[in-house]
Image: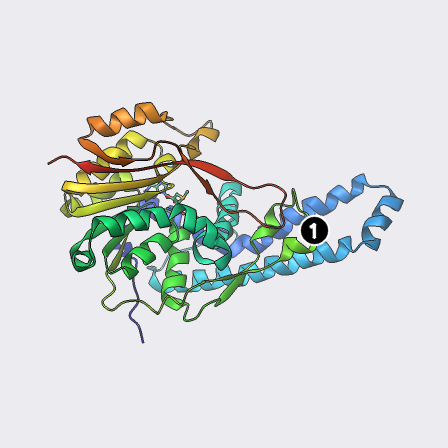
Amino acid sequence: MTEDIGALDLEVYEHDDLEYLKRVIHSLRNYQACALNQLSHKQRSLSLCSLPQKELLLEHKFGDYLHNIMNSIEANQAVLQDILKLAQQQLIKLELEPDRKTFLHDFARLEELFLQIVREWSSEGAPVRQASFEPILQDLKSLYPLSQRPLTKVLIPGSGLSRLAFDVACQTFDCTVNEQSMLNLFTANLILNKCTRIDNYRVYPWIHNLNNKLEAGGTTRPVAFPDVDPTLRPDPFRFQVIPGDFQQFLTRRPDLEGHFDCVLTSFVLDSTHNVMETVEVIGKCLKPGGKWINLGPLNYVYAKYPAEMSLELSWDLLREVILASGFQFVKEEETPRTCPYVSDRNSISSVNFQCLHFIVEKKS
Ligand SMILES: C[S@@+](CC[C@H](N)C(=O)[O-])C[C@H]1O[C@@H](n2cnc3c(N)ncnc32)[C@H](O)[C@@H]1O
C-alpha cells in the first residue's frame, strides 16, 4: 500500500476560495447536464435542413453519431464523479445549493481538463510531452548530478495535472508544486493517489469540438489514462502540493522565501495576469545561485478576455524584466522551439506554439 502523495491542505482556504471551490464542485456535478444541453443546441440546428437533407444525414448514421456523443458525455461524467468523490473526502463540509447553475466558463474549464489529461497523462500525449517537458527534464538532470538530487528543492508553479512534477520527483528530486486550479489539483489527486494501473480510466476528450473532423466515428474515440502506473515511484517520494495563486505564494508561505534551488515553468509565464509579478516571485523563491528553467510561449491567456487585466510583454521587454530582477542568462535558445499542444489525430487542424526556452541564474 503506497502512501497518498501531495495531499491538499485546505485549511489555508479563505472565504473567497471556498466560494470558488463550490463553483468547481458544482461544475463537476453538472457536467453531463450542461454538455447535453449544448448538444441539444446542435441538434436544433437540424431544423435548418430540409426533409430530404435530414433523411440523407439519418441514412448515413447521423443519429448514431449524436447518440454516441451522448454516451461519451455519460462516460466523462463517471470519471468526473470519481474526481469529485475523492476531493470531497478531503474537503471540509461545504454547504452546496442543490440547483446551482454552472457558469459557461466553468464548463469550458472541464472541456480543457479532458485535453489536459491527454497532454499530461496519456500515451497519445507522449510526443507533446517529449517536445515540452523533456527539454526541461534534460536541463534539470544536466544541472544536478544524481547524488545531489534528493537534496535539490525544485518548485513547479502552474503545475497543471502534475505530470512534469511527477517525472521530476521520479528522478528523486525534492519537488513542490503550486497550482491555482482546484479542478487540476483534484484531477492530479485522483491520478496520483487512486490510479493503480496503466489505463485505469478512459475519457472522451474530442466530443466538445465538432469542427475539422475527418471522420464522425473518431469524435467518440476514447483516450485512456494514465500511461504510467503512478504507484511505481521511488521511495521516499519527495512531492508536496501548495495550492493557490502563485503571485500570493510567499504571502501564504513566507517560510519558503529563498528556499528553492530550482524553479521550472512550463507554459506558465503567459498564464498569469502579471508576468512581471511572476518573475519577481520566482526570484524571491530561489536561493542565491538558484536556477530557473523555462519553456513556453508568450500566448498571454487573459489577452482574449476584455474584462480581465493582462500584461502582454514582448520577449525583448520580458528579457529586460528578467535581467533587472537579478537574473543572468545561463542558456538561451536563439530561435523559438516549436511545441505542439494537444490535438486530435482525427482533426485536420492542429495547434503548435513557438516556445522560448532558457535557463537563468539568480545572482548571488
Ligand atoms: C497552460 S497550463 C500549463 C500546465 C503545465 N505546466 C503544462 O505545461 O502542461 C497553465 C497552468 O498554470 C496554472 N496557473 C495559471 N495562473 C496561475 C497562478 N497565478 N498561480 C498558480 N497557477 C496558475 C493554470 O491553472 C494551469 O494549470
Picture quadrant where residue 175 is located: bottom left
- In the displayed structure, 275 sits above or below 73; it is above
Considering depth in this image, is 333 or 103 the residue closer to the camera? 333
Residue 309: x and y in percent read 38, 28
Q: Would residue 136 be found to the left or right of residue 122 on screen?
A: left
Q: Residue at x 29, y 51 (%)?
A: 177
Residue 114: x and y in percent read 51, 53
Residue 221: x and y in percent read 61, 58
**Helix, strand or loop at disc 1?**
loop
Q: Would residue 81 be found to the left or right of residue 231 on screen?
A: right
Residue 355: x and y in percent read 40, 36
- Residue furthest to the left: 364
Q: Would residue 283 be found to the left or right of residue 109 on screen?
A: left
Quarter of the image with the N terminus is: bottom left
Q: Residue at x 86, y 50 (%)?
A: 55
Cβ at disc 1 under 8 Å from ligand 1: no
Quarter of the image with the C terminus is: top left
- Residue furthest to the bottom: 1
Which residue is labeled 1 in the image? 215
Report how many numbered discs are placed on residues in the image. 1
Q: Quadrant of ligand 1?
A: top left
| Amino acid at dot 1 | Glu
